Image (cartoon, helix red, strand yellow):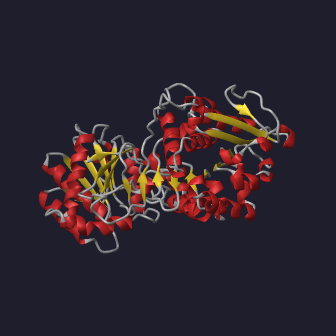
Amino acid sequence: MHILSRSIAWPILGAAQVRQLEPALQALSPTPLMQSAGMACARLALAVAPHARRIWVAAGPGNNGGDGLEAAFHLHQWGKEVVVSLVASSGPTPADAQAALQRAQQAGVRIQPDMPKEWLAELDAQDLCIDALLGIGAKCPLSSGLRACVQAMQNGQAPVLAIDVPTGLNPQSGQWLGGDSAAAMAVHADHTLCLIAIQAGLLMGHGRDATGQIWLEDLGFRPSQHSVPPLAWLNLGYMAPIKPHASHKGSHGDVAVIGGEGMATHGMGMTGAAILAATAALHAGAGRVILSLLPGQAGDNVPPDVMQREFKMLELEKLHVVCGCGGGTAVQALLPEVLQRSSCLVLDADGLNAVAQNSALQDALRQRAAHSGTQATVITPHPLEAARLLGCNTAQVQNDRIKAAQQLAERFQCSVVLKGSGTVIAAPGQTPRINITGNGRLAIGGTGDVLAGLVGARMAQELSSFDAACAAVAQHGQVADDWPPGEALTASRLARRLA
């Protein structure tokens, strides 16, 4: 059994892929797969709640409930006081789950259709609840019986161990089953045990808050030995390269940041966004950073290490360009030239909004792949910007973030950073990555500008667009994870903390 780590490239599978694997994995073991899963859950239960006297298992009518019943069987055998609340179903019970029920009954496990309310009231913080209500195929809002069990788990003092996925969470998208209003009707687990592989929804959206510590029992699944391609891979953590002694500023690339519309245009200054991107590129190790504010004004509070230059003076063919941060409407007039001439390009914020509104700019973005290659461009939309580019709504993007990122990558033939909880990085011909670094402290203005500048710096250091995006996203979140407690995280401080 493994604990989720950003140092291992974990495969992310969907429910259909896991089901496809199960027969092959069963052929590798003389023990029924459900019994192996139940044993893994029981062992983890003892590890996370070693002093538990009472363990409540809330079991659903399907295979997830069968895993819970197998866990209850072992925990009962090991001397724990176990009670199983078995939620009834109008449909047939799977054969494996029926066999698990019979094993638990024969062993003397206390199994009942309702919740033992008085017994549950005695559970304390040393005891444990096991959520085995719904598995990886969950798609529909919860029934009243399931909701009652969820509420009992949430209202009690005992920690919760969820099997596969916390009940109430969509395992694919990380959204709540039933929409945002259903947040109170979902389990917020302290630990989640994934069986065979990790589901994407545990790493995205509300999944990051609902799952607690993620554990994986692969039950014999080896990506190199099985022919099931993953939906995505976990994005690896960032390791800072060591600059060779025999290098100079020209060895580490030139980044130009174009954006930061001034107050003269519409009475609202946005120069800070471009300055943040330039500062990030500077601190991330770009050899030279050039700032081109719009429309042509010089900026105050620009780091002295950053050069300022008018747009018309930029040799775009020789530069790694970051365009759009705080660009406002002024950036629209420059985009045709930026898209056509830039050697490498990171397109963000108002640059993306301009492209979404103009079919000619969309064509120009696609055509960059023909003359510069797909490795020359990265776009960094948040969900609303992604929805504008795809012609859909934000909910559709969030309901399948992997698919949305892949659609953008194919449509515009470039690398895509779909920002948010569980940022997705995609590119044509690449298996997407899901990033798990970062936290809610990044949910402030300007951190996206810092990320754009960081991607530009990594591209300037001769990483491909996809690799640059993966490295920058991992580092951006890692810095936030390592942020000192009690110190306010701001975008400007974040930019200066990069290396």
Q: Residue furthest front?
A: 246
At 75% from the left and 45% from the top, the residue drawn is 327
Q: Nearer the viewer, residue 483 or 337?
A: 337
Examine the rendered structure and indicate whether residue 358 appears above or below residue 245.
below
**Residue 123 visible (yes or no):** yes
Q: Position of residue 384 (x, y in %)?
A: 64, 55
Examine the rendered structure and indicate whether residue 96 appears above or below residue 114.
below
Q: Is residue 76 left or right of residue 338?
A: left
Examine the rendered structure and indicate whether residue 215 appears above or below residue 25.
above
Q: Quadrant of residue 149?
A: bottom left
Q: Position of residue 364 (x, y in %)?
A: 70, 61
**Residue 280 visible (yes or no):** no
Q: Quadrant of residue 322?
A: top right
Total numbered labels: 0
Q: Is residue 375 left or right of residue 241?
A: right
At 21% from the left and 66% from the top, the residue drawn is 26
Q: Nearer the viewer, residue 287 or 326?
A: 287
Q: Nearer the viewer, residue 284 or 62?
A: 284
Q: Position of residue 499 (x, y in %)?
A: 52, 31
Q: Position of residue 108 (x, y in %)?
A: 14, 57
Q: Is residue 395 left or right of residue 331?
A: left
At 47% from the left and 31% from the top, the residue drawn is 244
At 52% from the left and 63% from the top, the residue drawn is 403
Q: Quadrant of residue 415?
A: bottom right
Examine the rendered structure and indicate whether residue 480 appears above or below residue 6.
above
